[in-house]
Amino acid sequence: MKVIAKLALAAASVILISLVIALPVMWLWNWLMPVIFGLPTISFYQTIGLMMLSYVFIKSSTTVNK
């Protein structure tokens, strides 16, 4: 039973952290990018994907320079 509780806590933590990080990014994108650059607004899941993609690019560029 303790393992299930730890897994549930871990899943809840991941969901909470993704909300705390992704929502401000989505709000800023949807507030600034359509007005400045004429880009479309994005959904929450598109924000998560955009953040994952940018992490891959930033992580790969920092490991190449070392």
Image: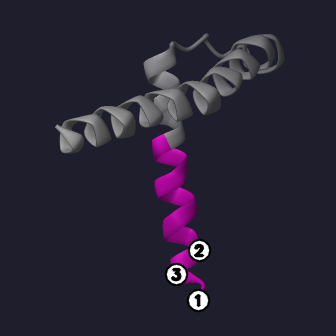
Which amino acid type is shown beneath numbered disc 1?
Lys
| Left or right: 63 as drawn, with respect to 31 | left
The reply to whether dot 3 and dot 2 touch (C-beta < 8 Å) is: yes
Residue 66 image label? 1
Q: Is residue 17 above or below residue 33?
A: below
Q: Which residue is mark 3?
A: 64
The reply to whether dot 3 and dot 1 touch (C-beta < 8 Å) is: yes
Q: Which residue is depicted at the point 52% across and 52% down? A: 55
Q: Report crowding for label 2: few under 14, some 14 to 19, many 20 or more residues within 10 A (C-alpha).
A: few
Q: Which residue is depicted at the point 59% across and 28% down? A: 22
Q: Which residue is mark 2?
A: 62
Where disc 1 sits, the SS reads loop
Q: Per the image, is 58 magenta?
A: yes
Magenta stretch secondary structure, dominant: helix
Residue 55 image label? none
- Residue 58 shows up from this direction: yes
Where disc 2 sits, the SS reads helix
